[in-house]
Amino acid sequence: MPLTTNKELLTLAKKGGYAVGAFNINNLEILQAIVSAGEAERSPAIIAVSEGAIQYAGMPYLISMVRTAAAQTSAPISLHLDHGKDLNVIRSCIDNGFTSVMIDGSEFEFEKNIEVTKKVVEMAKGKRVSVEAELGRLKGIEEKISVSEKEAILTDPQAAEDFVKRTEVDALAIAIGTSHGAYKFKGEAKLDFERLKEIARKVSIPLVLHGASGVPSAVLERAQRFGAKLPGAKGIPDEAIQKAIGLGISKINIDTDLRLSFVGALREILTTKPDEFDPRKILGPGREAIKQTVQSKMKLFGSSGKAA
Ligand code: G3H
Ligand code: 13P
Ligand code: ZN
């Protein structure tokens, strides 16, 4: 089937009370793993491509691979630019077949964020391309953080309402205490669910949770057993993800868990079979490990069985 848009996927998710996973790709194996997980689970999926991924693999390769994947699968997928910051890259994605783009103006103050976000909404107007924006900063909140520091980082519900009205974006990424990478919390995992509740009360478009990897212990232990050094790695517990979905999150971004799964499998093969030098025998198990992780996310997010 042709690529679908995030707006289509997330409207259904919001209505159905589940979330769609946005999974980052950088190469063929990661894409194949996500798409075959979607097939196995009968689940929609968002294929997320960062500006770094575009630099690494090249836009034409990524677009052709994702289009080919979409043509071969019966589960809906969209092609989404993750954390777009460069307006030239965003324009190029819109003009070349992406069905969703994120404009990440979160580093700017409120008015400047609105200004850049509106530019992208304007670029996407009349095209079959959804726009996601971000308000608030995805920095982990330390246990000893002051109230004013916390307010400066996390998304203000009233500001979110104003931002959405003024920009007319299709989805909004919010900050409630998650952060990117494998080191999200030093102590207890803590998310600001009251804030999420308030934002969901004021904002009717789908809400997005970035930095949502769980750093699952089995995945981490496999990587560590075969030499990975990741002391203190910690992610978002599954229960917190389920609670966030129940409170109105419709899109959940996962990259770190895919990276950890891939590298754990590669490390195991390279360690246990030092005579192996066929890339297919090394990358193949990495692809399988990602597929399993993505399937478990689809079950957790409630998107399994939701492919039309
Ligand atoms: O949030 C960012 C994603 O994990 C992509 O990371 O910019 O290193 O490709 P990247
Ligand atoms: P993680 O680092 O928690 O996987 O978050 C990924 C993300 O937000 C991509 O935009
Ligand atoms: Zn992100």
Image (tube, rainbow, N blue to C red):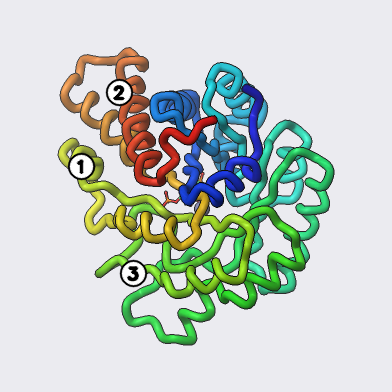
Q: Is residue 252 visible?
A: no
Left or right: residue 48 versus residue 185 is right
Give the quadrant of residue 179: bottom left
Q: How far apart are the alpha carbons under marks 1 and 2?
A: 16 Å
- Whether pointer 2 and pointer 3 mark residues with C-beta atoms closer than 8 Å, the reply is no
Residue located at (42% from left, 58% from top): 246
Query: SS at mark 3?
Result: loop
Disc 3 packing (10 Å; few <14; some 14–19; many ≥20): some
Say which mark, if any, is on residue 218: 1
Give the label, 1 or 2, closer to the camera.
Answer: 1
Give percent across and percent down for residue 70. 59, 23
Give the label, 2 or 3, closer to the camera.
Answer: 3
Say which mark, if any, is on residue 135: none
Residue type marked 3: Lys
Give percent across and percent down for residue 38. 45, 29
- The residue lying furthest to the front in this view is 16
Residue type marked 1: Ala
Q: Is residue 117 above or below residue 42?
A: below
Residue located at (68% from left, 53% from top): 170
Looking at the rendering, in which quadrant would you find the C terminus? top right
Residue located at (71% from left, 57% from top): 169
Q: How far apart are the alpha carbons under marks 2 and 3?
A: 34 Å
Left or right: residue 154 versus residue 58 is left
Q: Earlier in the sequence, mark 2 or mark 3?
A: 3
Residue that numbered label 2 is attached to: 285
Residue type marked 2: Pro
